[in-house]
Amino acid sequence: MSDLSKNTEKLKLLLEDLYRKYSLSYLESDPIYFPHQYKDPLDIEIAGLVASALAYGKVDLFKPKIAYILDVMGKSPKEYIQGFKPAREHRFDSFVYRFNRGPDIIHLFSIIQRIIKTSGSVKTFFMKGYSTHDPDTENALSSFVHRILEMDCREAFPGGKLSDGFRHLFPAPGKGACKRLNMFLRWMIGQHRLRPLERDTSVKANHAHRHPCGQTVKISWSYKKKGSGLEDGSGSHRSPEGP
């Protein structure tokens, strides 16, 4: 075996060891910890969208905020969203996390509620803007963000104008790297090694794509019908924690 082959094998073993260490032992230090607490596909999607949207800044600062939000939502984010009434929810009146305030969370819930009512799932809503003919996921992300930002916001913002804080939760491609949205996609696509699941149903493109940050991905948003969690990215994404 050549020196190059030996070094490659050593590097492989080192990287695999680091992967095992940070994929399992450090799961609770990553925002993906939150969607992993649910089994129902809609609970996973909703928790994933909430967690990824707020996952900016330091982990030890945003994690308690996400935990509080999901704690308010109870055992099933899906059931909470289905019965959500903005005017009756006052547990976020004093909510503050960096750029975001209570009305941002209220509007986020309203947006998710409309998505579920009109499309049935976040997945279906997202896929309405996705085309296998696009060279990357930029158009799909742009469509996703544009449709969210165009929704009526007067229940949370009486003046009808979105706050800068809410816009920060959904940055449009071209105005930033969209790291958190790409992280959400990473959680929703492919196969997640932390909880290997059988693939019963999927919507996927049969060719690789390159998203705006340059990583190659395959859109394959899949869940096990009777399983215990979510599947994660077969493509290579960063897992950002910043804005």
Image (cartoon, rainbow, N blue to C red):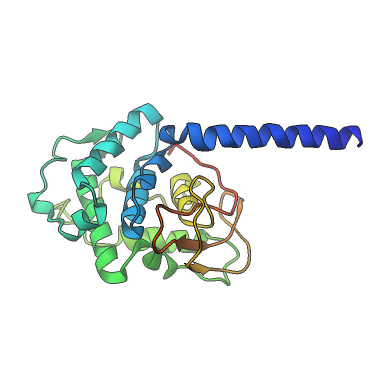
Along the line of sight, which residue is nearer the eye, 230 or 91? 230
Q: Position of residue 71 (x, y in %)?
A: 22, 41
Looking at the rendering, in which quadrant would you find the N terminus?
top right
Q: Residue furthest toward the left?
A: 88
Q: Position of residue 40 (x, y in %)?
A: 33, 57
Q: Position of residue 194 (x, y in %)?
A: 50, 45
Q: Position of residue 75 (x, y in %)?
A: 23, 48
* Residue at x 44% of width, y 61% of height: 224
* Residue at x 31% of width, y 54% of height: 43
Say if residue 168 shows up in the picture: no
Along the line of sight, which residue is nearer the eye, 15 or 196? 196
Q: Residue furthest toward the right?
A: 2
* Residue at x 51% of width, y 52% of height: 196
Looking at the rendering, in which quadrant would you find the C terminus?
top left
Indicate whether 184 appears above or below 126. Answer: above
Along the line of sight, which residue is nearer the eye, 166 or 69? 69
* Side (left or right) of 6 relative to 208: right
